Image (cartoon, rainbow, N blue to C red):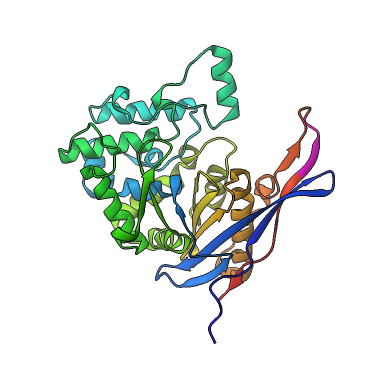
Amino acid sequence: MSQPLRSEPLLIESTRSGHVESVHRVHVAVVDAAGALVARAGDPQLVTFWRSASKAFQALPLVQDGAADAYGYGPRELALACASHSSEPAHRELALRMLALAGNSEAQLACGPHPPLSQAVAEAALREGVAPTPHWSNCSGKHAGMLALARHRGWPLEGYERQGHPLQERLLDEVARWSGTPRAEILQAVDGCTAVNFGLPLRAMATAFARLATSQEPAARRLCEAMVLHPELVAGTGRLCTELMALAKGSVLAKVGAEGIYSAALVPLGLGIALKVEDGDMRCSPPALLHVLGELLERAGGRAALDLGPLAHHAEPPLRTTRGEQVGSLRARGALAFT
């Protein structure tokens, strides 16, 4: 008899002064490149929005259709096209460079400004009296890439971010191809950065990452290599995407998304991972991802060696008072169900 698809969810507990204060349920899908389910927690078929964890697949047509080569985009530019960056100076400068290389301007960015994801950058901007503009957006690299592709293909630049625009139809095709999800079954909604975002099952998201990590397609290889070479551009100082990929040196691809989404690939095993914190608490997705990776690495034995010890501050992030005293932490509880 086949095992049921659902299993107990992974839990992230928030503790305070030795007591569990709150509990967050996490759904997980781990699959191989054929889409076969390898492990799960909760509901691996949960349909939710992929948010920024989909950015590599939104960036693929930039390379496939020749725009990246036409405008001289190298690994740094491609890494930023996949990024949810922290608005650090290097991120902002590179976003403006991407726009200029393609003959576009910041005024054409459909993404709006927001407080930097980096608290240090946000505090510095406040001290200096600097008001962020659209190229500060964590999605400015993605949008600069979208504008470049639209210009290269001769599509209208106005409205490039909207559902039904030729650019967004092209990206939808790519998401469908890599995830194995029919176009008609993919939900479409407006992301926080105003562009189209896609809703599909966690299992399909994980399938896309497994296929990306194992693909021999030149565009896929270029994007993966760009993320591995420049993890500091994919997120930023102190963030898990950057620190994990820098530590893994090519054995892990990782990309966070809003509302408790994380997608990753464990490259030596050819596995894709997608998880969703049910209540959308973004604090919980890094410890959840590291817990999942830890289980997969332990089960793999010598087939995939990676010491996650240096990332302990993400695996069990401390909770502190306003005076900096640690009074608790977030911690993962539970285990994957393996097929």
Residue 247 placed where, x, y %? 57, 49
Residue 319 placement, left or right of 223: right
Q: Quadrant of residue 137?
A: top left
Residue 232 placed where, x, y %? 50, 38
Does the magenta run of residues contain 84? no
Q: Quadrant of residue 293?
A: bottom right
Identify the residue at image location x=65%, y=48%.
Answer: 311
Q: In the rendered view, would you say 227 is above or below 126?
A: below
Residue 295 placement, left or right of 19: left
Among all residues in the image, which is located at the extreme top? 129
Q: Is residue 72 visible?
A: no
Which residues make up the magenta segment?
A: 324-328
Among all residues in the image, which is located at the extreme right? 18
- From the viewer's side, name the closer residue of 286 and 277: 277
Identify the residue at image location x=58%, y=53%.
Answer: 278
Q: In the rendered view, would you say 147 is above or below 292?
A: above
Residue 101 placed where, x, y %? 26, 29
Q: Is residue 147 visible?
A: yes
Task: Tell me the quarter of the image containing the C terminus.
Answer: bottom right
Task: Tell me the quarter of the image containing the N terminus.
Answer: bottom right
Q: In the rendered view, would you say 316 is above or below 152?
A: below
Identify the residue at image location x=57%, y=47%.
Answer: 280
- From the viewer's side, name the closer residue of 301 and 137: 137
- Number of numbered discs: 0
Q: Magenta stretch: dominant SS?
A: strand
Among all residues in the image, which is located at the extreme bottom? 1
Q: In the rendered view, would you say 199 is above or below 303?
A: above
Residue 279 placed where, x, y %? 59, 49
Does the magenta run of residues contain 326? yes
